[in-house]
Image (cartoon, grey):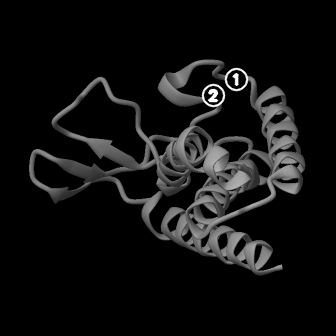
Amino acid sequence: MKSFLKIIISIILVLVIDLVTKHFLFEIDYYNLIPNVVSIASNGGNTGAGFGIFAGYTIELSIISAIMIIALLIYNYFVKNKNTFYCIGMGFVLGGAVGNLVDRIFLGYVRDFIYLDFWTSFPVFNFADSFLCIGAVMLVIFILFMGKKNEK
């Protein structure tokens, strides 16, 4: 029960951060947050996935996202010894996926607005993307190094 609560709290925190920042920052024409490092600007909305792949496939990406969320929930059910690291990682992944899914369902695109000025070919992203990536790395670390230790 404690692990479930930790995951839910992580999901809620990610969703609040993601949706609030999208609401307030997506409409900014341009703001140089850290010169030559990070800028904030509206990209007009992303109908695809990272790096613009599958642009225009919003419905298909929404379905894939929903399936992945369900798959993660099923996987979570079968993980026995969930530590805090796992719970936060799972919450980050689920919160990020849900944050972008909310955009796709209600807007038809994902609101991306963070630019890395020092790496011009890097895709525009948002906080949901960041949490999703961080959470995925945490889950991989858990599976590779912590999960097996907990099951012995």
- Residue 138 image position (x, y, % from top left): 52, 49
| Front position in the image: 18 or 148 | 148
Any mark on residue 74, and which? none
**Residue drawn at point x = 84 percent, y = 79 percent:** 1
Outermost top residue: 53
For disc 2, the neighbor class at 10 Å (few under 14, some 14 to 19, many from 20) is many
**Residue drawn at point x = 38 percent, y = 59 percent:** 28
Q: Quadrant of residue 71?
A: top right
Residue topped by disc 1: 56
Task: In the rendered view, tell whether residue 100 sits above or below residue 31.
Answer: above
Which amino acid type is marked by label 1? Gly
Left or right: residue 24 versus residue 46 is left
**Residue drawn at point x = 59 percent, y = 69 percent:** 84
- Residue 5 image position (x, y, % from top left): 76, 79
**Residue drawn at point x = 75 percent, y = 24 percent:** 57
Q: Secondary structure at mark 2?
A: loop
CB within 8 Å, label 1 to label 2: yes
Q: CA distance from mark 1 to mark 2?
A: 6 Å
Outermost left residue: 35
The mark that comes first in sequence, 1 or 2, is 2
Left or right: residue 37 versus residue 133 is left
Count how many numbered circles sit on residues in the image.
Answer: 2
Residue topped by disc 2: 48
